[in-house]
Amino acid sequence: MFLDDGWKPPREPSWEPPARKPPLTKGQERAVIWIVGLNVMLLFVAPIGGASVVHAFVALFGRG
């Protein structure tokens, strides 16, 4: 609307990236690898076990 010739926008403070967490130690890396490996193994084993349980319930309580 009105223009003030002497106006300047306020200076923004200098931007700094947030502080980063230190990298994982060797022990923490090993623990993460074991957890991921166990989860991948269970990804394949658990459905077989679940199917066996369902099959057992069908055999016990189903007709036939």
Image (cartoon, rainbow, N blue to C red):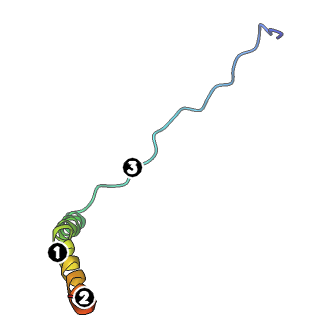
Is residue 18 shown left or right of residue 25?
Answer: right
Residue 30 position in % (x across, y down):
18, 66
19 is higher (above) or lower (below) than 55: above
Residue at 24% from the left image edge and 62% from the top image edge: 25
> To which residue does mark 3 refer?
20
The residue labelled by disc 2 is 63
- Distance in Å between CA atoms under marks 2 and 1: 23 Å
- Identify the residue at the far bottom of this view: 60
Q: Earlier in the sequence, mark 2 or mark 1?
A: 1
Q: Which residue appears at 24% of the width and 85% of the height?
A: 58
Q: Nearer the viewer, mark 2 or mark 3?
A: 2
29 up-or-down from 2: above or below = below
Type of the residue with mark 2: Arg
Image coordinates of residue 53 in percent, x first then y, are 22, 84
* Label 2, residues with CA under 10 Å away: few <14, some 14-19, many ≥20: few
Local secondary structure at mark 3: loop
Q: Which residue is mark 1?
A: 48
Circle 1 sits in a helix, a strand or a loop, which is it?
helix
Disc nearest the viewer among 3 and 1: 1
* Quadrant of the frame with the C terminus: bottom left
Q: Quadrant of the N terminus?
A: top right
Kind of residue at disc 3? Arg
Going by the picture, which residue comes out furthest to the right?
A: 2
Please state which of residues 24 and 64 is positioned toward the viewer in this rendering: 64
Sequence-first tag of 3 and 1 = 3
**Residue drawn where x is 17% and y is 75% of the image:** 48
Disc sitting over residue 11 in the figure? none
Q: Type of residue at label 1?
A: Ile
Q: Nearer the viewer, residue 60 or 37?
A: 60
The CA span between labels 3 and 1 is 42 Å
Between 48 and 64, the residue placed more toward the observer is: 64
Residue visible at 21% across and 63% down?
Answer: 29
